[in-house]
Image (cartoon, rainbow, N blue to C red):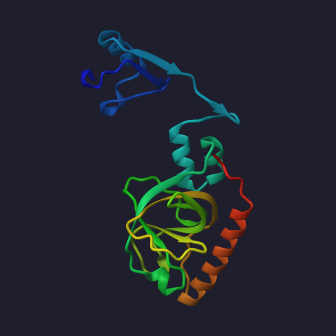
Amino acid sequence: IDHLNVTEIFCGADFAFGYKREGNVEFLRALGAEKNFRVNVVEPFVFETQVISSTRVRDLIAQGDLDAATRLLGRYPSVRGRVVKGDQRGRALGFPTANLATAERRLLPADGIYAVRVRVNDIWRAGAASIGVRPTFGGTTRQLEVYVLDFSGDLYEQVIEVEFVKRLRAEKKFASAAELIAQMQRDVEEARTTLINIEILP
């Protein structure tokens, strides 16, 4: 810790670190006394009777409960990633999507279809996102694909940010591409309507 030049640390009362999380607040305070840095323990922040914690927020996002996660975060959950070339399945279906390269451990909401806001070149645009394996086409790899409404530019290799505003439905396997296209059209219109009426959070 010496090379970090630490002078002050803030942590929660249940903070743990190190191998098997064996380090705790008491150990950190003792280390602070030895290495001459201050340790400040922050009291839990309670909102609507719930203690706000990173674990709680991550669980809500993973479950697709965006309403609860947004209330605790004070903003819409979001992810950033570079747009990479996919198999262009969306383009063939009439909905060209941006495929985001995200780290395997990057936290994404539960599989499904979402109304999203997409930041492209510092401009926020409406969009619809799909998270899942694309079961209609026998996919096995989990992907995040984003369709940006009323946009025709080239996004390849750009880094974009996606805000997840509302979960519209779960991922579903369709009997044919035609059925999928019809549902995608409904999803896009529902996303458009949803995003017209949302509260833009700071």
Q: Is residue 94 left or right of residue 142?
A: right
Residue 176 visible here? no
36 versus 190 height, above or below: above
Across and down, in percent, residue 185 comes to: 64, 80
Quarter of the N terminus within the rendering: top left
Across and down, in percent, residue 141 comes to: 39, 70
Residue beneath the point at 56% across and 54% down: 63
Across and down, in percent, residue 187 comes to: 64, 74
Residue 150 visible here? yes
Residue 17's image quarter?
top left
Residue beneath the point at 60% across and 51% down: 76
Which is more toward the observer, 60 or 125? 125
Across and down, in percent, residue 121 comes to: 50, 61
Residue beneath the point at 46% across and 56% down: 80
Which is more toward the observer, 7 or 142? 7
40 versus 152 height, above or below: above
